[in-house]
Image (tube, grey):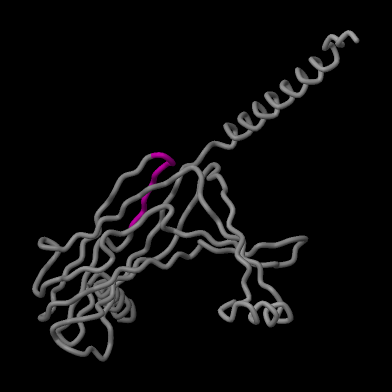
Amino acid sequence: MGSLKKLVFFTLFSFAIFLPEVLAGVGIGMGPTRINLNTFIGKPYSVTIITYNPGDYDIKARLMFECRNCSYDARFLGLKIGEIREDYTQFFRFDPTEVYVPNKTGPDAAIPITVYITPNAFIKKDLVLFTPESINFLVRLVNPDYNGELVIPYPTLIVDNKILKGGITLSAFWSTFGAMGAVPAVGSDFQMNIKGVPLGSVIIIIVLVIIVIATLMFRRTISKKFKPKKKK
């Protein structure tokens, strides 16, 4: 009997996960529930997310992405000195980010949102250093909006493989129902696997650059050494 209760609970729980959110006649749905993309640098393409509304009222919904690994600690000699952050829009973007979804629509008549994947070899990261309050006070005398973070942008190369993880949330912010006490929303897990420049290729490029620089310096030294002296 206990096993039967567990089975019924698991079935209802699984069914609830894949149902669109419906609250007081205001509904919202999104698919797929899990997005796993594989790409490599220099290969832009696009995929589609569908949004639909099984409820009784029209809605406007906003799509947002929360990245789980776009920031991590920056350490020096084992001590945390700040954070390293990167903007996920360097890898992909949504178009549009807000949609109008009529009522009584299902997956067969869904409103599409395009995900444009644009992976590049070079990306920009920000080194964010946290400054102490003793410095913050002085800086705010000149810039009252200073928040205690010194941002230093720098370029970097995607080497080998990069994984971007996060979650996509679609939430209704307006409906013909009127004011909503609670906001209906649905979510989807997201992961992007980017194949970057092979480490071996990076090493070869560095070695070639060193050889070229060394050759130029050697030729310059030799030319100066054996340059004929001007007669007085």
Q: Position of residue 29 (x, y in %)?
A: 21, 70
Q: Position of residue 231 (x, y in %)?
A: 88, 8
Q: Residue drawn 35% across and 49% down?
A: 117
The quadrant of the image that shows the C terminus is top right
Residue 178's place in the image compared with 67, above or below, is: below
Residue 55's place in the image compared with 189, above or below, is: below
The stretch in magenta equals 35-42
The quadrant of the image that shows the N terminus is bottom left
Was residue 183 drawn as part of the magenta stretch in this picture?
Answer: no
Which residue is nearer to you in this view: 208 or 212?
A: 212
Which residue is nearer to you in this view: 39 or 157?
A: 157
Residue 51's place in the image compared with 120, above or below, is: below
Which of the 4 image quadrants contains residue 77?
Answer: bottom right
Residue furthest to the front in view is 232
Which residue is nearer to you in this view: 123 or 108?
A: 123
Q: Position of residue 213 (x, y in %)?
A: 70, 27
SS majority, magenta: strand
> In the drawing, does residue 81 fall left or right of residue 42?
right
Q: Residue drawn 21% across and 68% down?
A: 99
Which of the 4 image quadrants contains residue 190?
Answer: bottom left
Q: Residue drawn 44% across and 41% down?
A: 41
Which of the 4 image quadrants contains residue 104?
Answer: bottom left
> In the drawing, does residue 114 fall left or right of residue 81?
left
* Count of all numbered marks drawn on residues in the image: 0
Which residue is nearer to you in this view: 100 or 155?
A: 155
Q: Position of residue 176 (x, y in %)?
A: 13, 83
